[in-house]
Amino acid sequence: MFTLAHLSDIHLSPMPRAKRRDLLNKRAIGYVNWHRGRKFVHRREVLDLLTRDLHERKPDHIAVTGDLVNLGLPEEFLRAAEWLNHLGSPGEVTAIPGNHDAYVRIHPEAGTLHWRPYMEANADGKALVPTPETQFPFVRRFGDVAVVALSSAIPTMPFIAAGKIGTAQRAALANALETLGREGLFRVVLVHHPPLPGQGWHRGLRDAGKVKHIFKRHGVELVLHGHDHVHMVQELETSSGPGFVIGVPSASEAVAGRAPAARYNEYAIARNGNGWRVEMVGRAVAASPEHVWECERRVLRER
Ligand SMILES: [Fe+2]
Ligand SMILES: [Fe+2]
C-alpha cells in the first residue's frame, strides 16, 4: 500500500515587506487586497496545525498543488522554499506552481527555481517518461504509483487568475499517461487549476476541455488539484476505468465561523486483483479549540 497526502493553496503568511519598486505592477492591487482582507483568511497557525498532523501520520509521499505564495515577491519564494524544506525532502514532497506563483513575470532564479528539487522527475520516473523541454510534465515513480506533474501557471493581467496547460504539455501528458498505463501503474496527475470545463474565462483552465479529453482517452486513476479552495469530487469515465478528479481546500484557510476549513486529503492506494482499492481520508482544522480531525473517510473504489 502507498499513502499519498495532498495539500494545496498554501498562500504562505506573513507577507514579507514589499519594496516600492516591487509594487509597480499587478502586485500593487494584490498587496492592498492582502492587507485589507486575505491575511485574515490565510493564517500561518492554521497551516502549521495541518502540517504537524501530516508529519505525525507520516504518509509515504506529499503532493503540493500550487499557490505557495501570494504576490510573487522574491522574498516570498525564499520563504516558501524554507517551508517546503520543513515539510519534507525533495524525495518526499512533489510540488507544482499555481497562478499566484506566476503572479507577475519574474526571472526563474528569483522565483520558482528555488523550489526546483521539488519540481523534477525522480530516476524511476525519468526512466519511463523523459522530462520534455517544457520541464512539465515531469514524472515521479514510487513502485506501483506514478505521479505526473503539470504546470498550469501563466502570468496574467490583474483580476485574472486563469491557467493553461498548452499544446506542448498536453502532448507530453497524453504520451505519459499512455506509457504509464501500459506499465499497469496507478496514475496520479497533479495540476493547480481544476481540469474541468466551465470554470469561467477569468479564473478557469483555458484548455480544460482538451485536458479532460486526454484523461478520458488515455486513462487516469486520480487527478489532484487546488485553486478553488473548496473540496470537490468528480468521477470520470475513462478508457481504462473510473478516474477521480478531486480538489482540496486551501491548507491555510481560517476556520472560525466560516467554511471551508483548511484541509488535506490522504489517499491509501493498493492493488486489488486486476484493479485498485483507493481510500480517501480528509483531515481538517476544526474551530475552537483549533485542532485537526478526520472530517471524511471514503472508499473511492474497491477494484
Ligand atoms: Fe489559491
Ligand atoms: Fe490559484
Image: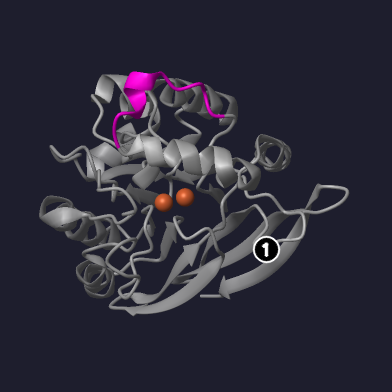
* Residue 56 visible in the current orientation: yes
Examine the rendered structure and indicate whether residue 170 appears above or below residue 243.
above
Q: Locate residue 184 relative to residue 10 in the image: left or right.
A: left
Left or right: residue 227 versus residue 277 is left
Which quadrant of the structure image shows residue 39?
top right
**Residue lying at 41% horizontally and 18% vertically, measured from the top left:** 19
Please report the residue visible at 44 percent of the width from the left and 55 percent of the height from the top: 227
Q: Which residue is mark 1?
A: 259
Q: Is residue 40 left or right of residue 145?
A: right
**Foreground pick, 135 / 186:** 135
Say which element carries label 1.
Answer: loop
Mark 1 close to ligand 1, CB under 8 Å: no
Colouring scheme, one of rainbow, by chain, secondary structure, one colour: one colour
- x and y percent of residue 238 in the render? 32, 77
Amino acid under label 1? Ala
Judge whether residue 19 is colored magenta: yes
For the point 40% across and 41% down, the residue is 29
Q: Which residues are magenta?
A: 15-25
Number of disc labels: 1
| Residue 10: percent from left, percent from top | 53, 42
Indicate whether 234 appears above or below 75: below
Foreground pick, 22 / 259 = 22
**Which quarter of the picture shows residue 38?**
top right
Residue 84 spot, x, y in % from top left: 51, 29
Magenta region, main secondary structure: loop
Q: Answer with the quarter of the image where residue 113 lies.
A: top left
x 82%, y 47%: residue: 290
| Position of 236 relative to 250 (above/below) | below
The question of residue 59 being in magenta is answered with no
Q: Is residue 70 visible?
A: no
Q: Residues within 10 Å of mark 1 (few under 14, many from 20)?
A: few
